[in-house]
Image (cartoon, grey):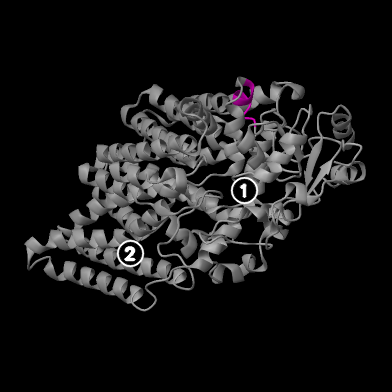
Amino acid sequence: MLLAAALRAWNLEAGGVLVPYYFAGVRSMVQSWHNFFFNAFDPAGFVSLDKPPVAFWLQTASAKLFGFAKDAVLLPQVLEGVAAVGLLYWLVRRRFGVAAGLLAALFLALTPLAVAVDRSNNTESCLVLVLLLAAWAAAVAVESGRWTPLLAAAALVGVGFNVKMLVAFGVVPAFALVYLCAGPGTMWRRIGRLAAAGAVLAPVALSWSVAYDLTPPQDRPYVDSTEDNSMLELAVGHNFVQRFVRRAGAYERAAPAADSGAAQAATPQPGRDYVVAGPLRLAAPSLAAQFGWLLPLALIGGVAAWWRWTGPARVQLAIWGIWTLAYGIVLSAAAGIFHAYYLAVMAPALCALAGAGAVALWRHYRGERWTALLLPGTVLATGLWQVYIVQFYLAGSVAIGQGWLIPAICGIALAAAWALHLLRHRFEAAVLPVALASLAAALVLPASWSVATGLAGFHSGFPAAHPPFETQTARNGRGRWAQFAGALDGDPKLIAFLEQGRGDATYLLAAVNARQAAPIIIATGAPVLALGGFTGRDPILSVDEFARLAADNRVRFVLVGDGSRNARRAYGENGQKALTDWIAENGRPVDPALWRAAAADEDPGAADGRPQRPAENIGMQLYDLHPAPSGG
């Protein structure tokens, strides 16, 4: 847990990863209970965030306690990540012993993607902790035969729904199948209890969404990323269908040509962690490096553990195994919106299987049967698997190891496997040190990725683990992709101009989408309208409704356009065309020299891979709907 805390909290203020959209939401939620309950993106409560509120409530509580700042908003995820490591240790230790629990906890502490998400303001850290608590309750329900732990597991999954909606339901097949097959009583009694658990799950999961939808639309924010202003539509549409069904939408159009088809899967993309959907998606090196360095140990060791243990231990193994399988199938098939950090939800189950599997492999190795060969075989398979991952990064993402890294990994894996095979009956005293050395060698690469992620200095974007000794090309590539999340810091020149010219207007600014609005909200805490929500496509206001806002002097300045060419394509440069046409006809363009920083290249990258601030203003035009008679 100390190791996990060090990796997750080191240099957090300068090195944490913040999604500006969520960061602005916390800035808004701190300001009123209304914004807090309705998960508002902006201080005026015009539009909501596109996720449920539980994780953001925790971030808001931290910001309220310690003051709105980067580290205050990131602190809950650090604590959740460290707590998950401790809880996984306890869960695995219950049935497989202290050594298995320690190994599982160590593996999770060193999982690069877990480090990345726990250093970000995304919701995965909270979701993982809630689902681990649910797994504990489900296992106790099977073992004890009592009702209350099963109902508690259902309620916790319902809480998970209010962290990240339907993603939380990925553990339901594991819990239901295990209880149905191994629970107490007759089959009909088990079915009845599962039905009761479902009766608990549904109201807990839907409570906030139903309360939201039952609130009159004029008394709450518009639901972001929806057509019909419904939180239930958000759960089924944007957060389910759009993530599983490929469409010619925002993210698909934004991706360069190399990101489509087999070419993208086969060609290394420095700084890019996307892989097209398919049965082998999660085996792609760019994703396996995020969470799967010990995959052979988890798979082979999980089977060995199933052979080794019976009874309640198998219940735990079944939960971890089905958890891994269910999420693996779901995330492999997600053909719509996809980010590498979604895979964080698989990490605890894989680490539990690897921890229990390592102990089982050792016990098989110390026996007299042919299964003694499984440990040397797993050592060799893990080494070769890590070679497969590393060779992808040697094609342009890392600056060292071009001639020696792969031979070194192969040599160590072969030597360790052969030594374990030869020493078993000849030099008993040397066996344990060789096994421990093999384990340490297997952890070098995931530890390197985790340390590099902890030391990285990116501020804005989506969380992902970084390789050590990253090349400038890879850093620049990562910086370009981070532009899609938007800027974290608003342009001081633009903010000063808006504050000086706002007058008595209700809103400091109206912007086409939340990407433009977020940095202004973060910097000022002032009301800013995101006319089309996160992507700029939501039908929140008609032209007539916006015209009335302008006529009532509630809005004076409007920002149209959105950054570089790819960003404009991603965030719907035509999503609010009727509105932007009206703004262009009825507003006066403001001289860019008054509000915009100096021009920059289309897709610049700073030395550390972050996009330079001036790039955020490329392609934008500020309009004044109430210009002074002199034109100022």
- What SS does tag 1 mark? loop
- What SS does tag 2 mark? helix
Among the 4 quarters of the image, the one containing residue 275: bottom right
Q: Can you give x and y, in whole percent of width and height, for residue 475 in the image?
A: 51, 62
Q: Residue at x 82, y 35 (%)?
A: 556
For this orientation, the residue located farthest to the front is 630
Q: Nearer the viewer, residue 523 or 374?
A: 523
Q: Amino acid at mark 1?
A: Ala
Quarter of the picture holding the C terminus: top right
Q: CA distance from mark 2 to mark 1?
A: 40 Å
Instruction: Tell me the number on the disc at residue 382.
Output: 2
For this orientation, the residue located farthest to the bottom is 403
- Residue count near mark 2 (Cα–Cα under 10 Å), binned few <14, some 14–19, many ≥20: many
- Does the stretch in magenta take in 39? yes
Q: Residue at x 49, y 62 (%)?
A: 286
Among the 4 quarters of the image, the one containing residue 558: top right
**Contact, mark 2 vs mark 1 (Cβ under 8 Å):** no
Q: Is residue 200 above or below residue 453?
A: above
- Does the stretch in magenta take in 303? no
Residues rendered magenta in the picture: 34-40
